[in-house]
Image (tube, grey):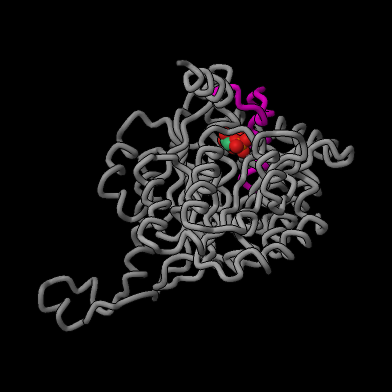
Amino acid sequence: MPDSKSDPKSPLNISLDLALSGKGAPPQAVYDASLAKAGQALDWLRGQQQSGSLELLQIPSRTDDLKKAEALARTIGKGMKTVAVLGIGGSSLGGQALTVLSKKSTKRAFVEFHDNPDPLSWRGVLKRVDKGLDITKTHFICISKSGGTAETLSQVLSAEAALKKAGVKNIKKHFTIITEPHKSPLRDFAEAIGAPTLDHPTGVGGRYSVLTVVGLLPALMMKLDAKALRKGAQAVLDQTLNAKSPQDSAVARGAALHHALAQEGRLATVILWPYADKLAILGGWWRQLWAESLGKDGKGSTPVSVLGPVDQHSQLQLFRDGPGNALFTIMTVDSKGQGASVPAARAKQIGVPYLAGKTLGDLVDAEARATAQTLFKNGRPVRVIHMPKVDEFEVGALMMHFMLETIIMGRLMGVDPFDQPGVEEAKVLTRQYLAEK
Ligand code: PA5
């Protein structure tokens, strides 16, 4: 992979060949109209950048916030065995996605993410104290843009209680807070215990915050190169803003493809299908980005994240022969020649000569190609993103691509990609139910 031409204009290796040709392609005139509209959305984006109104566009070139985060990262993990990141939704999924870059290790991860407030799981985390294990050696990075999310506050306050119960006196040494610079329950907590605090940028929504300190402080704790992440993002931003025409922008072309299919009533589902275990974690972040940004006003498409090759053996039948209203994005890495190889003699002896001398990576590569072609031949549009290197630059570029594509898609659909009234409604009701006697 890829067996098709990639977009030479993008810092990323993205091919729309199997989406813009064949039976599954949207009609050319519809795609052209969507692309022209995407051109207008690019003009809007340029305006946002010039006026400084869309803070996300300023993030990749910022350095001041990183200096403070780097200084904190050098100290907060000292003497600790675990850094536990507490936060939910956009306050956690970006950091989690960046674990795609963490080096494989047999040891337990130093940085853990606890987003779902399942009582049993969380009790297990806090129980370290009862077993006399290591909550006294855990530092909590607590992230909430609003500073008022019940799930995160419940974890933060119960963690403080557990630390006290374990006899910890210097509570502030165990907490770092990331929240917006205004009065809120979480900021009040930070002030009460004297914990260091980083500002969550007010103009960047949770699901767009991965390249702010929200994602980058956890990244720094994982020893990742935060500057390279931002450089990759900046490369995509530059390519998008400097594109002479929408045709020259991978972001505009991607959004136009989605929009053209939606115009034809063929975009009920969007499917991200990485062919590498390590890329699977990106799916959770991308799902929130797409769902929360675009699912509104009776519009939107459901993001589904699957994994290859394993889901060939569970979902592909539906994807090939089902309703046919999905766009597939298959993601591949350089897997050819990787991993264990199949001994040739035994493979021949048992009648599978096609496996003789092949590696598991050869198999995965062939399967990704086979899936893409199967879908394509059956009229299902397929986009292929190939990541020869899964490093900070590439991941930063990919994330910025997805964020800009989502924003442009929101403009094309006529929905606001930055609000989330559905999430807010449930938060209000949760507080109301909890307050009931
Ligand atoms: O993207 C969003 O806006 C939401 O998913 C929020 O990130 C999530 O609800 C957490 O909110 P907060 O960061 O305010 O705690």
Tally of marks: 0
Q: Quadrant of the N terminus?
A: bottom left
Query: On the rendering, which quadrant does ligand 1 occupy?
Result: top right
Closer to us: 263 or 287:
287
Residue at the spot x=33%, y=56% of the render?
309
Coordinates of residue 58 in the picture (x, y in percent): 80, 47
What's drawn in magenta, residue-wise? 400-422
- Nearer to me, 11 or 99: 99
Q: Is residue 140 magenta?
A: no
Residue at 66 percent across and 39 percent down: it is 145
Q: Residue furthest left?
A: 350
| 95 versus 406 height, above or below | below
Vertical placement of residue 377 versus 175, above or below: above
Picture quadrant where residue 217 is located: bottom right
Residue 369 percent location from the top left of the image: 39, 57
| Foreground of the two, 147 or 17 | 147
Magenta run includes residue 417: yes
Residue drawn at 84 percent across, 41 percent down: 49
Relative vertical location of residue 412 with respect to residue 141 in this rendering, above or below: above
Q: Residue furthest bottom?
A: 345
Residue 27, visible in the rendered structure: no
Dominant secondary structure of the magenta stretch?
helix
- Report the residue at 70% width, 62% height from top: 72
Point out the image quarter for the C terminus.
top left
Q: Is residue 142 visible?
A: yes
Q: Position of residue 99 (x, y in %)?
A: 52, 59
Determine whether 151 is above or below 341 in the image.
above
Horizontal relation, residue 92 to residue 409: left or right: left
Residue 86 position in % (x across, y down): 54, 47
